[in-house]
Image (cartoon, grey):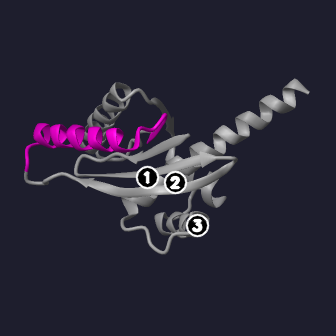
Amino acid sequence: MIILGVDPGSRITGFGVVRVANGKIEHINHGVIVMDGDDAFPRRMTELGSAFREVMEKYKPEQVVIEKIFLGKNADSAFKLGHARGVIMYEAGLGGAEVQEYATRSVKKGVTGNGGASKEDVQAILKVMLSLKTISRIDASDALAMACYHAFEMKKKALMQRAVSL
């Protein structure tokens, strides 16, 4: 199964692609989609949609995992993040993928054992877990964390189903 994790943003969107086979998580690729910050917001969302569609077509994930919205102090930022999430969900649906959402704290706790872990701590664990020398951008490591956490959750659900059926 191919899982595409996404750290959505209105200027930079991270993505991370993993394959789950025989209970193991294999890194396929990661990167970022960078929109021109000088472009008007609607234009950036169009760029995001086009670029994300290319990622979907290239990797053909069965599952797309996206960060749940975080309501910080800046309402405008939250609304823009919501629009970016909507573009990602729309393109994922068009690509035939099932969309899952997780809160950032849950992902950090699942990957590092600490829901308050720093982004750098998450990145360090992912490098070891996926045998990577570097992860180019923090946005990409956040997206890889989403994909890996979803793989953990899928494995946990499968184990629970087996345990119930015994």
Q: Which residue was labeled with disc 1? A: 16
Residue drawn at x 12%, y 37% is 42
145 horizontally vs 135: left or right: right
State the image coordinates of residue 94 (x, y, percent, origin top left): 33, 25
Q: Earlier in the sequence, mark 3 or mark 1?
A: 1
Badge number at residue 125? 3
Magenta-drawn segment:
39-67
Q: Nearer the viewer, mark 3 or mark 1?
A: 1
Query: Where is the C terminus found, in terms of image quarters?
Result: top right
Q: Residue at x 53, y 68 (%)?
A: 127
Q: Is residue 126 magenta?
A: no
Identity of the residue drawn at 61% across and 64% down:
129
Quadrant holding the N terminus: top right
Residues marked 1 and 2 touching at CB (< 8 Å): yes
Gap between marks 3 and 1, in whole Å?
Answer: 15 Å
Q: In the rendered structure, which amino acid carries the disc numbered 1?
A: Gly
Q: Amino acid at mark 2?
A: Ala
Q: Amino acid at mark 3?
A: Ile
